[in-house]
Image (cartoon, helix red, strand yellow):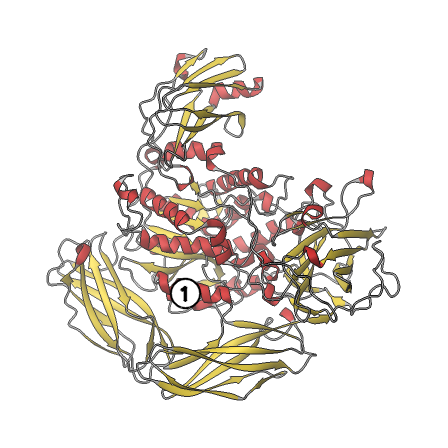
Amino acid sequence: MIASPRSLRLAVIVVGLALVVSGLPATAAAPPVSKADPIDLDALFIGAHPDDELFSLTAFGQWDEYDDITSGVVTITRGEGGGNAVGTEEGPALGLIREAEERRATAYFGVENIYYLDKVDFYYNVSAPLTETAWGHDAILERVVRILRQTRPEIVVTMNPSPTPGNHGHHQYAARMAIEAFYAAADPAAFPRQISREKLQPWRVKKVFLGGIGVNTAAAAALGELEGIDGLLGDLLPEVTSPAGSGDCVSLGGEDPTEVTYSVASTRVSQRHGKPWGAVLGDAAKEYASQGFASTENQALLAALGAALCNVFIQVDGRVPFTADRDGPTAIFEGALYPADGGLPLGTELYLSTDRFRVVANEPFQVAALAGETANLDGSSVSLQLPEGWTATGDGALAPGPDEQWTTTFSVTPAADAAPGRVRIGATLTTDAGTATTLRVVEVVPPVRGSLQPLPHVAEFRAWAAGAGAPQLDSLIKDRAAIAVGETRTVRIDLVNYSAETQSGAVSLGLPAGFSAEPAEQPYEGLVSGATTSVSFEVTNTDPSLATSNEGGDAGDYNFTVVTQSSGGTATVEEALNLVPMTTIPEAAAAPTLDGVESPDEYTGEALDLSRLWEGTDPTGPDDASGSAKVTRVGDTLYFFVNVRDDTLGTVLPPEDCKRHWRTDSVEITLDPRGDSENTSTTFKTGIFPITDDPENGDPPCWQRDADNQQGPGPETAPGMTVASTVSDPYAGYALEARIDLADLPGSVDPSSMGLNLFIYDSDTQDRTGQTRLGWSTWGGVQGDPYRWGRAALPGYAPVALGPVAPLLDFEVAQSVRSPQSILQTAGDGVALSGDPRARSRFAAPRVTVDGTTLRVSLKARQGGRAWLFAWTGDHAAAAAELRLRPKRRKAVTMQVDPADMETLLAQGHLLVSFRVRPKVGIGTRSFDVPLSG
C-alpha cells in the first residue's frame, strides 16, 4: 500500500523503559526509543556496496516527492574494500565513512531507511561463486528475507546478476539474493522460525526488477561517445548499447525487446530542490567522496549524464497483473500500489508459469495461469494471446487450488515455422468484476543447439538462474574463449537436445579470417530428448599479426558461429574468441641490477606495449600516458622493467597509505601461475607506486598486494619482492624495476602458459582519483578476469612445487552494532541491526547521570550479551563505550566528553545503545535511542 505521510511513518512506539537523567532539566527526561513494529516501505533496493543505488535514486526521489512512495535500501557490505579518496582509513573505519556518505546521498531523494547486513567487501572480483564463499548463502538469504517480511515492500529493485564482462561479483550475488528472496519471503516453508518464533508473516513482494540506467533518445549517441563515462559507470555500462527501452529512454546496456521494461526520466524539475532530478544526482554523488565521485572530472561526467538521465527497470518476475509497455513515472507500480487496468481491485494476483523456458517449434509445452486475492473468481476464465500460428488447448476456466490460488492450464504448441528467439505469451483474466492482463516470455530454440563451452562462472550462473526460476536472465551473456597469439587450443562445443525426438547431425565452426579449426566438421549421433553431449575442435590463431585484446575484432571479440545441423534444421549461434597477447620470457645469465634504470643487455625479452586503453579517459597523446615493459627470468625469479611516460604526477601518497593503487599513478603486475584461474583469488597481483611522500627516506617507491590470494603490504605478503624506481626531473614520467620470486605465487607455474598482465594507472589530479587505465591485455574489468590476461612462456623453467591454492578472505568487517547511525535508524523503524532477529531480552531501566563532562550510564538486561554505547551529537560520536552484560545484573560505564561536545549533546544529542545477546543464548540485537535534549 502507499505509505502514510513521513511524520506518521517515523512515529515511534516507546517500550516500557524508564530513564533518569540527573543534572538535566526535567524536560530532558525523554524515554528511550525502541520501536516494536517495523516501517512499511513501498520499494526496496538491494545492492552490495554504498553507492550501488546511485543510478536508481532519481526515480526514488520522484516517487517520494510527487507520489508519497517510500523507498529503502539494503546494502550487504559497507564497502570496506573500496578506495579512499578522502583519507587513509581502511577496513571498518572506511566502512563507517562510506555508510555516512550513503546516508547523506540518499537523503537527497527521501530515502531514510538503509539496512546493512555486515558482510565483508573483500575486493573487486567478477565471481559470484567467490562471493558466496565469503558471504555464505543461507545466512545472508535469511537476513534479506527477514527484512522483506519486516518492511513489506511492494517492489524490489536490484542489480545485474549475470556475469557479463566486468560485472562485480558482489553485485551479481546481491542480485541473486534479491531474486531468491522474492520467492522465499512468500514461502511459509522458507525460514519458518521467522514465522513461528519471530511472529513475522510471509510477504508476497509484487514485482522484482533489475535497475539500470539510460538516456533520452536525443542524447544517447552523444553520451555513448563521452570520454570517461565507462570509467565512471564501471559495470553499470555493459558491453552493448541497445535501442530497446521504454518511451524515449534508451537503455545503456544489453536488453531483449521481449522484456518488460519501465523508465523514469530525470529531466523532471524537483520542487523540493529547485532543479531537475538529474542535477540533484550530481549534488548527491558528491557525498560519495571517498569513491571519487566528488572529483572535478567525475562531476563533469555526472552533469552530462544527469542532463539526459533516465532510470531503467527490467522486470524479472511478478505476481500481479500489469499492462504491457505502459509508460509513466509510476507505471512500474501498476498492480502493486495502484490497481491494474481492467477494474479488478488492488491485491489481485495474476501470473503465468511454464514447464520450460526453451521451447521447440511444433512441440507442445504447458502454461499455467494463477490468480488469487480477488473477492470471487467463480466462473472466471483466462485466455491466452499467442504469436501468429501458435495454438493452445484448454478451456481457461479457473479452478481453486492450494494456498487460496485459482489455476488453469493450457497446452501450447508453437507454430511449425516459429523462428528462434524470445517471444511473449500474453494472458487475460476475465471476471464478473473486470479484467486483468499479464505476460510471460519463452525462448524458441531449434531441436539441437550447439554453443561454446561456458566459462566456469557462466556455467554456474546458468545453473543458478534455472534453479531459481529465472532462466531468462541469461539474455546478456555471449560465451567467449580466450586464445593466445599463435596458439592452438581445444574448443569444446556443448550440444543440447531440446526436442522430444532423438537427434543426429553435425557441428561446424564459422571462424573469422586469421583462425582455423580441425576438423572442419564433427558429427554427433543418437542424442536422446533432453540429453547433452559435446564435440571438440582444435582452433588455431593462424595470423599472429591480428590485433589483440580490445583493439581486435568487434570491441575485442573475434565473433564466430557454431552451426549445428539436426533433423529439425540448422541452428546458428554467435560466440566469440578473445585474442590475448603472448610473449616469451627469456632466462638471463645474470640478474638485473634493481636501480630503476635499464642497463644494456639486462632485459633481452621483447618490449610489451602497455599503451592500450581499457577504462577511463583516452590519453591526449603518448606524453599524457603511455608505457612499455620488459620481463626476464633468472632461476626462480622474474624481473620487470616498466617505463611510463606521463605529463602530470598524480597525488603522491605517504608510505602508510600504500594501498588501493588505482587512485593515483601506479603500475599493476598480475600473474596467474597456471593460466587457468577462474578468479583472482588464486593469482598474484601487486600494485606499485613509483614514489611516496617520504622525504626523510628519499621518497622511495612502495608496493602492496590487492585483490588476489593474499592482501596487504608487499614486504609482508611477497617477501621475495623488491622494487626500485626513478622519477624524471622535470617530471615526464617514471621507470621502475621489480623483482618477484615465483615462490611467492600461490601455485606452481605452468612454463608454457603462465597468465601475465601489466597495467598503468594514470592520474592527472591531486584528489586521489585516477582518470586513465592502460595495459598490455585490455578489456573493461580485465583486472578481475584472469582468462583474458596475456600469456607468457618460460622456456627451460622447472616449476617450484607448491601445494593447492585456496582463497584467503580474512578481512575485518564494520558491524552495525558499532554504527551510531544504524543504531539511531533501527531504534526508530523497528528493524533489527544487521538483518538479525530482534533480541527478545528485556531491559531494566537504563540510568544516565551527567556530572560536568562525564556521562555515567548503567544497563541491565534479562539475557547476557554485549552492549555498545555512543554519545551522539548528530554528526559524530562524542564518546563511546562497550560493556558485557551478565544476565539480570546491572553494570555501569563512564564516558568522558569534550566540553564543546557536551554542550551539543545537551542541546540536541542522543545516547545510542545497541545490544547483542550472547551467542550461547541465541542471536538477536536491539537498538535504543535516548534523547539527551529537552
Quadrant housing residue 933: top left
- Label 1 secondary element: helix
> Where, quadrant-wise, is the C terminus in this rendering?
top left
Residue 734 appears in the picture as rendered: yes
Residue closer to the observer: 689 or 68: 689
Residue closer to the observer: 498 or 649: 498
| Total labels drawn | 1
Is 299 situated above or below 895?
A: below
Q: Is residue 659 left or right of residue 494?
A: right
The picture places residue 761, in percent across and down from the top left corner, at: 69, 55
Q: Residue shown at 54%/89% (left/top)?
A: 520
Give the farthest residue toward the right.
Answer: 600
The picture places residue 530, in percent across and down from the top left corner, at: 34, 77
Is 904 situated above or below 174?
A: above
Residue 69 appears in the picture as rendered: no
The picture places residue 616, in percent across and down from the top left corner, at: 64, 58
Name the residue type under label 1: Ala
Q: Residue shown at 44%/41% (left/top)?
A: 272
The picture places residue 568, in percent across and down from the top left corner, at: 36, 87
Q: Residue shown at 33%/36% (left/top)?
A: 9
Q: Is residue 764 left or right of residue 904?
A: right
Q: Is residue 737 left or right of residue 528?
A: right
Q: Is residue 664 left or right of residue 422?
A: right
Is 79 situated above or below 255?
A: above
Q: Which residue is mark 1?
A: 463
Residue closer to the observer: 556 or 374: 556
Crowd band around label 1 with a 10 angstrom C-alpha radius: few (<14), some (14–19), many (20+):
few
